[in-house]
Image: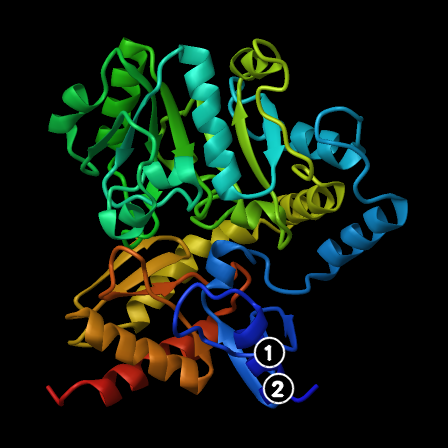
Amino acid sequence: MPSTNLRNLFLQHVAQTSDNPLNIQIDRAEGVYLYSGDKVYIDCISGISVSNLGHSRPEIIDAVNEQMRKHTHLMVYGELVQSPQVLLAKELTALLPDQLNSVYFVNSGSEAIEGAMKLAKRYTDRFRFTAQKLAYHGSTQGALSLMSDPFFSDAFTPLLPGITFMDQNSIEQIEASITHETAAVFIEPIMGEKGYLPCEIKYLKAVRKRCDEVGALLIFDEIQSGYGRTGSLFAFEQFDVIPDVLVLAKGFGGGLPLGAFVSSKEILSVMTHQPVLGHITTFGGHPVSCAASLAALNLLLETKIHLDVPRKSELFKSKLKHPAIKSISGSGFMLAIEFEDAVLCRKIIDACVLEGLLVDWFLFSESKMRIAPPLIMEDEVIARVCGIILDKIQESVQPF
């Protein structure tokens, strides 16, 4: 079908999330490239931190095909023993601290957050939550309740009661924000939609200490930062703070839909009774998704490609020098380029996309450009990306 017709059908029949979607038809993707007819795009957002190992990775495709030949869906999650789930859980927990030894598989990051919220309420017998201002944990009802920005939540009120918000890295607010009534504290170790801002170690340690004092669970949302994106398998490893619950999705699925919340066997056991089926999902932990996730994890362990991410991150920073760039924040391949205002930022982003470089913006930091490429991006491609960005900056601003 001609691409124009397909794009028109997309607008007519696929429910839209905005009035102005990119509307670029992608015919295939491989490595760090997206192909649209005769045009090639460099992917610098990885489907928002999903395609950590690039597109159409042969090892992941082989694992998916092998599992497809065995079986796809069999039964609602948690009833039948399915080797992709078991092997993934075994491999994953072997890489985590001893207390993170049990995995509940779900479909997405939002559902993982919802499951973690239910788990905290059930385990602590409390209902209040604390979250960081301008954090993003998902768009479902519970996850949306953890969002401080009323622009995205007011249209869907009333949401969950009992939510307290505190500023990132504000140690002074911790005691009042986390009390003996708090069920759990949700933290993005590297805040995503705020513009890739890492938490300070002393702040995370103070939050951990306060949670222990009052009996609240500490929940780390590593939906964007997991599976090697920051240079370690999980960002929390760089902070010397262990959460009670770890939430995963995006890159965790190896390109397929998959999420999980990971905790101790003791904590997760409360979901089995009073009531039975405390959380239930039909497709969570789908065997094909788990096979892809396990293949991606094994690839990371074998190639150790993530260990080179900090060096590549510094390469980006060293090449992106221009008076119009106010700052570059982030960690690893979670980078945010800050400009003077949102108008200039969107102008540069749009120009980059037209040039064949797929970059993006942030929900809560509209003056920043998102740089989150696949971890496999080579130095010469990084140089090309930086060249395009600098060219488009120069075209978009007045001469300095």
Q: Position of residue 375 (x, y in %)?
A: 52, 58
Secondary structure found at label 1: helix
289 sits to left or right of 202 = right
- The Cα atoms of the two marked residues, 1 and 2, are separated by 6 Å
| Visible residue check, residue 89 | yes
Q: Residues within 10 Å of mark 1 (few under 14, many from 20)?
A: few
33 sits to left or right of 87 = left
Q: Nearer the viewer, residue 126 or 204?
A: 126
Secondary structure found at label 2: helix
Q: Position of residue 207 (x, y in %)?
A: 26, 24
Is residue 118 shown above or below 351? above
**Amino acid of disc 2:** Asn
Q: Quadrant of residue 217?
A: top left
- Identify the residue at image location x=49%, y=49%: 307
Is residue 191 shown above or below 56? above
- Res 9 label: 1
Answer whether labels 1 and 2 touch (C-beta < 8 Å): yes
Q: Nearer the viewer, residue 255 or 119?
A: 119
- Identify the residue at image location x=79%, y=41%: 73
Colour pattern: rainbow
- Identify the residue at image location x=64%, y=71%: 30
Is residue 219 shown above or below 54? above
Q: Quadrant of residue 20?
A: bottom left
Q: Nearer the viewer, residue 92 or 311?
A: 92
**Amino acid of disc 1:** Leu
Q: Position of residue 297 (x, y in %)?
A: 63, 44
The N terminus, quarter of image: bottom right
Q: Which residue carries the number 2 mark?
A: 5
- Identify the residue at image location x=31%, y=13%: 212
Q: Nearer the viewer, residue 205 or 365?
A: 365
